[in-house]
Amino acid sequence: MALQEKVIPGTPLGHMQDYIPGPGTYIHNDYVYASLLGFKTITKPEIENKENLKGGFIKELPTMSVLDLKTSNVIPEVGSIVTAQVLRIFPKLAGLKIVMVGTNPCTDDFSGIIRVQDVRATEKDSVQIFQSFRPGDIVKAEVISLGDSKSYYLSTAKNELGVINAQSPAGETMIPISWKEMQCPKTHVIESRKCAKPF
C-alpha cells in the first residue's frame, strides 16, 4: 500500500473496471470517487490471478480507497529520523517540538528531549547544551526511545544529525563552518552548535 496524492470529496479516482472501491470512496456512473478529504491509496491484491471453478483464471483488481487525513498522521518510532524545533534550553537537556517524521509533516503535537549525553558520540563529558543548541534552531535527530505517549528521547550523536538551520542575532541564516560552529554571513559572528554534516 502506497500513499498517493491528496484528494477532496468528489475527486474521480478511477473506473470500476480497473479498481475495487474501498473505504472513503463511492460509485457514480461506473466511476470511483473520493467521499472524504485524505490520501488516494491503491492496495494491490495479494494474488493477482485467482483460479476459478472451471480451471481458468480471474484477474484480481487493486482496491482504491481514501485514507482520512485524521488517521493518516505519522507517529515517531524508535529509529525514525525527525525534524524538530528547539523550544527551550536547560542545563542538562533541550526541549523540542517534532514537526516532521522523515519527509512527512506531523499534524499532532509531539515533544522531544535531547539529553546532554545524547548530543554527540564522543567527548560526552564536555558537552554543554547551550553550546549545542539555541531556541529556534531546526534540528535533525533520531528517535532513540519512546518515553511517554507524546515525549520522545532524541539523539544527534551521528555525524549527519544536529542543527540544520539556525538564525543569527542579525536575522540571517547561519552557515556551518565546522561540525561545532556556525557563522552569520552578515556580521561574521561565530556561534557554537552541534551541526549536522551535509550528505
Image (spheres, rainbow, N blue to C red):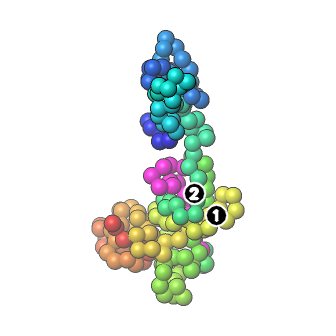
- Measuring from the top left, give residue 152's x and y in whole percent: 62, 64
- Give the residue pinned by disc 1: 146
The secondary structure that most of the magenta stretch takes on is strand
- For image coordinates 49% across by 11% down, the residue present is 29
Query: Residue extending furthest right?
Result: 148
- For image coordinates 54% across by 88% down, the residue present is 125
Residue 11 visible: no
Query: Residue extending furthest front?
Result: 55
Q: Amino acid at mark 2?
A: Pro
- For image coordinates 48% across by 87% down, the residue present is 123
Q: Is residue 154 above or below residue 107?
A: below
- Give the residue pinned by disc 2: 76
Residue 153 visible: yes
Left of 189 or right of it: where is 140? right
Q: Indicate yes or no whether the magenta region holds residue 8.
A: no
Q: Amino acid at mark 1?
A: Leu
Magenta residue span: 93-106
Left of 86 or right of it: where is 184? left
Where disc 2 sits, the SS reads loop
